[in-house]
Image (cartoon, rainbow, N blue to C red):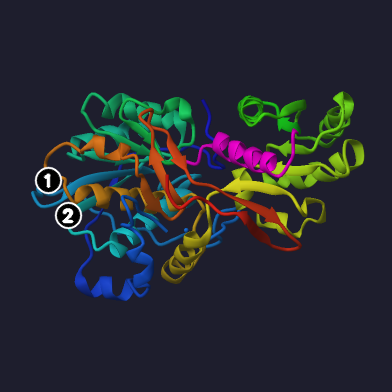
Amino acid sequence: MTDNLRVEQDEKASPQTTLAPAQGQRRSLLKHAALASIIFLAGCQSIVPRGGDRPPATAPTPAPVTGELPTDQQHHRVALLVPLTGKNAGVGQSIANATTMAMLDTKAQNIRMTSYDTATGVAAAARKAVADGNKLILGPLLSDNVVATANIARPAGVPILSFSNDAGVAGNNVFLLGHIPSQSIERVVSYAKSKGMKRFAALVPNGVYGQRASSTLLRSVKDAGGTVISIQNFNRDSQSMEAATKKLAQNGEFDAVLLADNGTMAIKAAPLIRKNASGTAKILGTDLWNTSSNLAGAPSMRGAWFASVSDGLYSQYADKYRARYGSAPFRLSSLGYDAVLLTVKVAQNWKVGTPFPIEKLTDPGGFIGLDGVFRFGRNGVSERALEVQEIKNGSFSVVDPAPKGF
């Protein structure tokens, strides 16, 4: 079980608490009223810019740290489990900052958010969160951490809204907010088929991600009524990639080829595909490309399609984040914002001191977030409405918008 997240795991337990904002603070942070008003459309909620693969240059300012939680009969206690120190502190603090922004933007009156640093042991953080009386856990990041947290939270009846994208850890009170890679492959294959493409090939990296991408491609193409001509694996080095591209066309020509890897590897592979396999096939990608801004400037990638969540609301959120914290947010931070929006929505009819109403999470109408419309299946995996983008000369263009609802 692995996540396709570019962060390493590192953990510890030490709480820091965020309460609902005072009136004066809210006024200064809610300049964009229209943005906040999007949150509760239909049965949904959220807002997010195209971020880079690298961490922000300047570390965001951490929230003030407090000691033990005081007795509180007026707020729902919600725990945030992320790394706030260590190697992954940048992404963890960015998520924590996003949750603070969401609390302010929604004028949350009845939620007490407490952050627990997972940098020296996720189990210790989870035990502390449960002992402090939190009724819902947001996080952690990686699938192994989710398993460790669930082993502690599940017996206590505390559900988890994780930022992982490993569907293997979902279910039994564990819900995943992470973007599931298979959904982006299904979406772009379906779009390609709608444009008359029937014969598909793929270039995938060795490892779990590549195996899952291959399985998803085979299933998606079969469901679309197409044919998979060839799938070749590579080791992420030039020699292996060259050999793999030469093998692609051995079974015949193809209309489209899936490059199931990040933007950096796609830029390296595309010229080899053009030289060794096909000069005309449409290149397809996954949601991993959404964080690779350098793709737009790569001539070999022009005309390629990939499916991902929409960036419209995220861009507005990112501008507000930069203004508040002085640096760009990590792309994953949108999941923290959306987690709070969802919690605030449910908390409207959630009695303080009672268990979190898990049944509200599987509303078939879903929720609206920074990353667009999403909903949870009964298996705990999030289903997202994705758009298809095309790489132009220096820019990305939406060629098939995401659905507005389910």
Q: Report whether 394 appears left or right of 182.
A: right
Q: Report whether 397 appears left or right of 272.
A: left
Split into 4 quadrants, where in the image is the C terminus?
Answer: top left
Type of residue at label 2? Asn
- Answer yes or no: is residue 265 visible: no
Kindly state the secondary structure of the residue where label 1 is placed: loop
**x and y, in percent, of residue 293 in the image:** 66, 57
Instruction: Place residue 288 in its image quadrant.
Output: top right
Vertical placement of residue 8 versus 44, above or below: above
Vertical placement of residue 305 versus 171, above or below: below
N-terminal of the two: label 1 or label 2?
A: 2
- Name the residue tied to disc 1: 352
- Answer yes or no: is residue 137 visible: yes
Residue at (23% x, 53% y) in the render: 66
Instruction: Place residue 215 in its image quadrant.
Output: top right
Other residues around mark 1 within 10 Å, as few (<14) / some (14–19) / many (≥20): some
213 vs 154, nearest the viewer: 213
Residue at (24% x, 63% y) in the render: 107
Kindly state the secondary structure of the residue where label 2 is placed: loop
Q: Report whether 368 appears left or right of 59.
A: left
Residue at (65% x, 59% y) in the render: 397
Q: Report whether 240 appears left or right of 10.
A: right
First to last magenta residue range: 178-198
- Name the residue tied to disc 2: 110
Q: Determine contact: label 1, label 2, CB under 8 Å.
A: yes
329 vs 40, nearest the viewer: 40
